[in-house]
Image: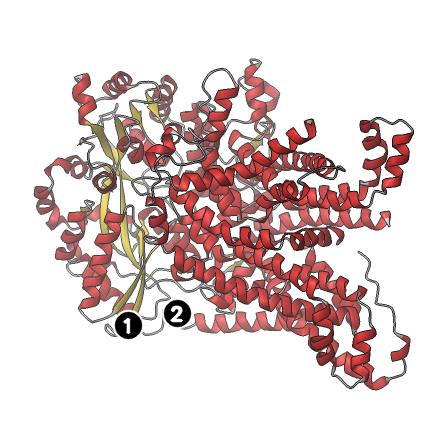
Amino acid sequence: MSVEPAAPVARERGRGGLRGRQGLAGWLFVSPALLLLGVFMVAPILLALWVSFRDWSGLAPLSASAPAGTDNYQDLLTHTGVVRGDFAKSLRNNVYYVLGVVPAQTLLALVLAVIVNAKLLKGRTFFRAAFYFPSVTSSIAVAFIFVFLFSPNGVVNTVLSALLPGKIGLVWLDDSDGLIHLLLRAVGVGSPPGPLRHEFLDLSWWDWLSGPSVALSSIMILATWTTTGTFMLMFLAGLQNVPVEVEEAAEVDGASRFQLFWRVTLPMLKPTLFLVVTLGLIGTWQVFDQVYAMTSGGPQKTTLTPAYLVYREGFQNSAMGRAAAIAFIVFVIILVFTGLQRLVLRRER
Amino acid sequence: MRIMRPALALVLAGVLSATAACGDDGSGKQGDTTGAKLTMFAFSSSPAEDAVLRKAIDDYNKQGRNTVDLKVLPEYDTALTTALAGGQPPDVFYLNDNKLPDLGKSGALEPTGDQVDNPGDFYDTLKQSFTYQGTYYCAPKDFSTLQLVYNTADFEAAGLKPPTTWEELATTAKALTKPGHPGLVLAPEFYRWGAFFAQAGAWPTDDGITKMTMDTQPMRQALQYLTDNHKAGSFGTPAAVGAGWGGEAFGKGLTSMTIEGNWIVGAMKNDFPSVKYGVAELPAGPKGKGTMSFSVCYGVAKASKSKAAAVDLVKFLTSPDEQLTITKEFPVMPSRKSLADKWLTDKPELKAFVAGGDYAKKSVFVPGFSTVIDTFNDGIQGLAKGNKSVDDVVSSTQKAGGSVLG
Amino acid sequence: MIRRALLTLFAVIFIYPFVLSLATSFKSRPEVAAHPVTPWPASPDLRAWTDVLVHSDFPLWTFNSLLVTVVATLLRVFLDSLAGYALARLEWRGRGIVFAGVVAVLAVPPIVLTVPRFLVLKELTLLNSYTGLILPLAVDAMGIFLMRQFFVELPRELEEAARIDGASIFGAYWHIVLPLARPALLTLTILSFQGVWNEFLLPLIVVRASPSLWTLPFGLSTLGRGGAGGQSFDYPVMMAGSILTIVPVAVVFIVFQRFFVRGVAASGVKG
């Protein structure tokens, strides 16, 4: 992001009095906002950075905590044990979550935006509102609604039972089987072949390759359902910038509708597409509310995410130092995506 | 950067003042016995328990010595930890025995165990649960044990009697199993499966909690027994039948047996008054009878400004009269030995729970052990679901414990 | 034709869950178990609604949510626009660096702040207070950024005329600029209202142990699961609570739909 100063105003040049006043006013105007941002955004990060190098349970005063060096980080990254294993699980889960949700929400948002944007569509406002509405509602309320939809004799199972042969009785939110594991089992591979029994970060390769569990998949469906609308609006804004003449010219040339979309519309949407994907990447690394309300990280830790792990370690397992360290690692992951986004956008300009 | 300076100064000032304030903790005076406003945290398993507790607090408030603000909180352990971490703990709070080592180690607790009336009257095993490194921290409120709860109508219809051995349990459960209705429903967690470990003579650690003892033949035998029965479909989990816990599955008729503690009595009375049930001792395993017991104490916060008043409240709540009133409506067992007979004469049908007190194992380990239990629970869920092997569970739990016990 | 069918299918997928939860809240528990999919209750039952409205602290949570949302939104709109104006229009030393700072803060994900904010609020003894719920939400970098962008594009003539007429800088801002900025302010108000109303993480750590200060999302999260009570997953109650939590935002959404759209478009452009 570039930080261009507003254009200097010629008339104000040389009027030292006003400039002086503006200097004071400028600081006065921003100081309340700066103070609050400093206290609740910047200072917390510095304090937490410090805590992440201490052994603090959260149960006794902070001043009574002992320095821990890099122990908290080592427990997460280099020391073998439960802590590293749980962190590895959370990373695995979140990676599958990202791999599932980001493409799904981007693709669905794009398709919906293109259809809604079509000329001669009646009820456009209604459809746009309908798709966007889930995005503005409370994450907890929506999570509860999905707990109900995915309950053992809930809507999802009822609909599936009607569509598929046999009665579907999946216990969605309590099913820890990974989708890839289920696929493998279907073709007769029920247990890990030898080489996959080796461990990386206290998690066997077989478990790394589990795929998202059925429970996590339910949360992924929920996430796609709630975020698609927002991204659809972004695509719609992007589509406004595609000049009608270009499309019409291509149409005259006899391009099929698909060719038109692929060759003309999509390239012009590239900046929006990139924006949607990076915002998606940033957002999907922060999933917390849904996990809290639907599964609390279970079953078998297959819905544990780094964000939820921060909360669990800090407020349940009384390891505030470790929680702060996890938060910093997540921060770095998200910063990488944000940095990438800004870099590419700058180049686009 | 300029913007950081005021913020940093503010935070540093905050840290300093907090440090200064901490100096008063513990060494400060205990406050007066009367005239204090106390905050108390508690949890409740049912509206029935809730009502009993509120009545007890009302009674105390009416005596006019202190005023108690009672907060009944969901997801209790996290709420308590958060309040302690925030430096504004309640004066008096329920404390689960499995959390005692963590809190004892942190120094957040004021030792008040011996300050109640006639402290010798409490069961020694319960007092041990609330002792960490030689300090007896808090007076036990009551205790519960796990036993077998069975549906009398189902048993009569099938001509069955409560099972007394593992084999009988397996066959009984099988006989009662129908599609979507396992004979026995039990939650896939250490706090239920542990009873079977006890019956097999197995336990995750040795008695002194110095080393892990997962990799033993009895432990494997118990895990295998439970796994096989889950695989056969005669044991099931609450989630698999669409219930939140064993008692709910049992009350709704989704199973004919469950393994729960005293708290199920209140829930049945409240939510499923028409279901007739009996409580039997859990069947004996290869090493005889075994179960788990759970206890709660009244903790007093070290950071409390009114410790003397807090102790006064605990004294009231642990007095024999009050214990009998509380445990009458909500039938957990009194923590005072002298009340055992009186309690039982009122409710002879619950004698199995009392009997369990003699041989129950407790889930009190060392600080930081909860991560090991978490790992074990993962494994147990995997065994119940059938996607983990006994070997995996034994080795992962052994390893997890090794990193905590050192 | 296919297009329309597809749109309709998705409209159903996106809207039906809300319709169904409304219907479920009027069903009895046995009916929910027997007919989970029907969008109307066979024999309407008000049990869940009385449970929520009379036997829970829902009214209290609603009051808390309203209080926190209104105060935080007012503060946010005022402080964000003030700062945005200074960054766009006033000339002062350090403006560039402050703006860079605001942009940097934009990149901080809220989840990272869970533990740190708890620590700072603890040191300021603001845990378990309304202030602790409001102040961290009273300013947001995104709002400052949006307002700055808006002010940069606003024509200067009017405020300059006012200043030449002797109005103070604040006077010109308050009387001339703000009225012109009404669309941007409204967008910010609505985004802020929705954001604060739905905020879950902050109440979770700040007022966890003070039931009298719970806001709707956290209160809702404790509903219907009954602790370890006799019956868990009381779906009618969970759905009634969810619907009630959604309704205020839904009303705002229906009335001010175009401002939501504008807000997303604007935040999308931020880069």
| Residue A193 shown left or right of residue B192 in the figure | right
Chain name for mark 1: B
Q: Residue at x 84, y 26 (%)?
A: A256
Q: Nearer the viewer, residue C255 or C15?
A: C255
Residue that badge 2 annotates: B25
**Above/below status of B155 relative to A62:** above
Q: Residues within 10 Å of mark 2 (few under 14, many from 20)?
A: some
Find the residue positioned furthest to the top: A188
Q: Nearer the viewer, residue A115 or C230?
A: A115
Going by the numbered disc 2, the residue's amino acid type is Asp
Q: Position of residue B253 (x, y in %)?
A: 27, 28
Question: Is residue B115 among what the camera can see?
Answer: no
The colour style of the image is secondary structure
Residue that badge 1 annotates: B36
SS class of the residue under badge 1? loop
| Residue C150 shown left or right of residue B259 in the figure | right
* Distance (Cα) linking label 1 and label 2: 18 Å
Chain name for mark 2: B
